[in-house]
Image: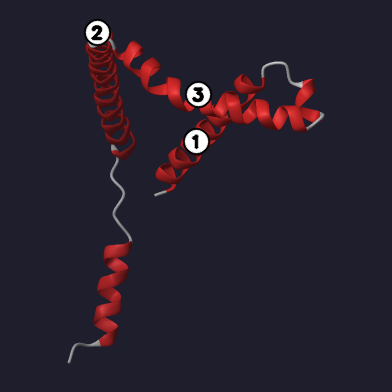
Amino acid sequence: MAEVDFERRIERLFADAPAFGDAEAFAQRVERRLDRGWATRRVLIGFAGVVGGVIGASQLVLSNFATDVQAAAAGPARLLTAGVSQVASQSDWMSALTGAGNVVWLAAGLAGLAVAFVITRMIEEI
């Protein structure tokens, strides 16, 4: 069996790191190197994001994405507009809204944005 006093003395020695005379200069040198690396990484990641965004946007434009989305959304948009107009005709509070369909789409978009913020916050906490 090991001696308890000896183990405690060893633990204390390892817990108290010796102080060096150039510790502050060394810490500053390491921090500068780390900061320089992060600045370079940020620039490279930003450049890659811009290039990826340009490529993605050009692919969307060339694939007639807007017309495909408009054609795909025409059916559900008609159903939603019909449902909202039916509800609007039955209630007085909907008559105050001039663009009821736009309000519904705006509310759905804001709800989606809120969900995205919550997910982002959860990822940061992990």
Dot 3, how many residues are within 10 Å of its Cα: few (below 14), some (14-19), or many (20+)? some
Q: In this rendering, would 95 be left or right of 9?
A: right
The percent coordinates of residue 27 (x first, y second) are: 31, 36
Which residue position holds label 3? 77
Q: Quadrant of residue 18?
A: bottom left
Which residue position holds label 1? 117
**What SS does tag 2 mark?**
helix
Residue toward you, 126 or 86: 86
Q: CA distance from mark 1 to mark 3?
A: 26 Å
- Depth check, mark 2 against mark 1: the one in front is 2
Q: In this rendering, would 122 be left or right of 61?
A: right
Question: At 26% from the left edge and 21% from the top edge, which residue is drawn?
Answer: 45
Residue toward you, 112 or 21: 112
Q: In this rendering, would 116 be left or right of 57?
A: right
Position above or below: 13 against 103: below
Looking at this view, name the residue that lies furthest to the right. Answer: 92
**What SS does tag 3 mark?**
helix
Q: In this rendering, would 112 be left or right of 91?
A: left
Question: At 24% from the left edge and 25% from the top edge, which residue is drawn?
Answer: 37
Which residue position holds label 2? 58
Question: At 31% from the left edge and 26% from the top edge, which residue is drawn?
Answer: 35
Mark 3 touches mark 2? (CB < 8 Å): no
- Depth check, mark 1 against mark 3: the one in front is 3
The percent coordinates of residue 10 (x first, y second) are: 25, 72
Q: CA distance from mark 3 to mark 2?
A: 27 Å
Position above or below: 76 against 23: above
